[in-house]
Image (cartoon, rainbow, N blue to C red):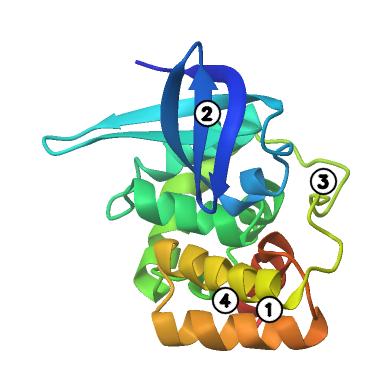
Amino acid sequence: MIGRLRGELLEKHPPQLVVDVNGVGYEVDVSMNTYYQLPDVGRPVTLYTHMVVREDAQLLYGFYERSERSLFRTLIKVNGVGPKLALTILSGISVDEFVHSVQHQDTVALVRLPGVGKKTAERLIIEMKDKLQDFQFSDADEFTLTDGMGPVSNSAATDSRAEAESALVALGYKPVQATKSIAQAEKTNPGASSEVLIRAALKSMVQG
């Protein structure tokens, strides 16, 4: 199994990356929390990974922090939660926020995430409450974007909007919902990069 990748970041198309390791390009799906912390394309990157082998595919999931991978592995052990839903959950909420929601039995915060209904939220709280004792809260409430904060041209803005919408759909949001949320994010973040739009859209949706 592949537990860690260290190489050059070749491509970034949220929520998927391509990492070159000694001439081999690995396609890796990542949460948006990890995506926000990535370096620029062409720079070295290290990711903690989890590999899922199915009959029709071999999928690699990557995480910037070891704690996020640990939470991902705990999530996929919950009945009804597969890797895709686990990645979606970790894109809409930080590790600290998720642990806080479970420990305080905050189903309202969890059901705002796509694919998480009331029953799934209750199941997450029941099955995970005793498994999160080792997770520690960090000092920072939010991750800081490392790049992509500056304004972009009109044509680039169109590309950023399309990439942001595509990322939300890949994370499990409905196309109509993705388009609407990105449009709203663009109003408050005119000319922003796709990373900024995705972050703003996810934040508005999970906070209600």
Cα separation, mark 1 vs mark 2, equals: 30 Å
Cα separation, mark 4 vs mark 2, equals: 37 Å
Select label 1 or label 4 by which is in front: 1
- The answer to whether marks 4 and 2 mark residues whose Cβ atoms lie closer than 8 Å is no
Cα separation, mark 3 vs mark 4, equals: 31 Å
Q: Residue at x 13, y 39 (%)?
A: 56
Position of residue 207 measured from the top left corner of the image (x, y, whole percent) = 68, 77
Which of the pair 89/34 is nearer the observer? 34
Callout 3 amino acid = Thr
Callout 1 amino acid = Ser
Tell me the residue that label 1 is attached to.
204
- Of labels 3 and 4, earlier in sequence is 4
**Which element is circle 2 on?**
strand
- Of labels 3 and 2, earlier in sequence is 2
- Looking at the figure, which quarter contains the C terminus? bottom right
Q: Quadrant of residue 98 in the image? A: bottom right
Tell me the residue that label 4 is attached to.
108
- The answer to whether marks 3 and 2 mark residues whose Cβ atoms lie closer than 8 Å is no
Callout 2 amino acid = Val
